[in-house]
Amino acid sequence: KAGVTQTPRYLIKTRGQQVTLSCSPISGHRSVSWYQQTPGQGLQFLFEYFSETQRNKGNFPGRFSGRQFSNSRSEMNVSTLELGDSALYLCASSLGHSGSYEQYFGPGTRLTVT
Amino acid sequence: QKEVEQNSGPLSVPEGAIASLNCTYSDRGSQSFFWYRQYSGKSPELIMFIYSNGDKEDGRFTAQLNKASQYVSLLIRDSQPSDSATYLCAVSRSNDYKLSFGAGTTVTVRA
């Protein structure tokens, strides 16, 4: 069974631009969660989607948004990029709610904001 | 108080030894516990999950859970150089089931 895929793998953007990242979950998985990982803050939860509905949201500003499609694929968008948004963005999928089921991560998108 | 705390490391063990990783959590109602391994430059990989008190073994890995003490640990037996990585403990919160991750413990297995 194919794993979680994320595109693009690497991205360089300029401050003030916006970016959209994509995630395709493992087949049959209905929950997709997004995380930001930085050396200083570790792995921080952004949001979780289940059946096209946002189930949970982390403590990030409104510039960070996401959505999930009927085929469970998910996208996250960051508007008005700041230098501090440079990070590894990870998507993870699970059969059901991320807290109750095993969660599997994709390879991540490395975003660099200059 | 952080929701999930791990021993800070780094932890250096000789090849063939047991590596012991500890994790404490603050939410007494947490029900699901996970260990991830993350190699440098890669994404986290799920290696163990445990839901009930006691021990759970999978190959060279053993997870131990003590809900009364709010403590979960991971033992790696017969450590190999390929076990050198950062190990992340993740705990599900009881109120909203979000996963909270610890900062990770970096393990180095020296040959």
Image (cartoon, coloured by chain):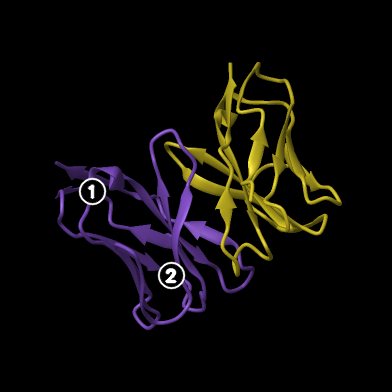
Q: Which residue is mark 2?
A: B26
Q: Chain A is which colour?
A: yellow
Q: Residue B80's mark?
A: 1
User: Label 1 vs label 2: CA separation?
Assistant: 32 Å
Left or right: where does residue A44 sit relative to residue A28?
A: left
Position above or below: A31 against B50: above
* Residue displayed at 66% across by 16% down: A14
Query: Label 2 amino acid?
Result: Ser
- Please tell me which of labels 1 and 2 falls first in the chain: 2
At a point 15% along the width and 56% down the height, the residue shown is B17
Q: Give percent across and percent down for residue A29.
A: 71, 58
Chain represented in purple: B
Q: Identify the mark at residue A88; answer none if there is no mark.
A: none
Residue B88 in picture, x, y percent from top left = 41, 53
Which image quarter: residue B22? Answer: bottom left
Three-letter code, disc 1: Gln
Q: Is residue B1 visible?
A: no
**x%, y% of residue A53?**
81, 57
Other residues around mark 1 within 10 Å, as few (<14) / some (14–19) / many (≥20): some
Tag 2 secondary structure? loop
Tell me the subunit letter for badge 2.
B
In the picture provided, is B104 more to the left or to the right than A111?
left
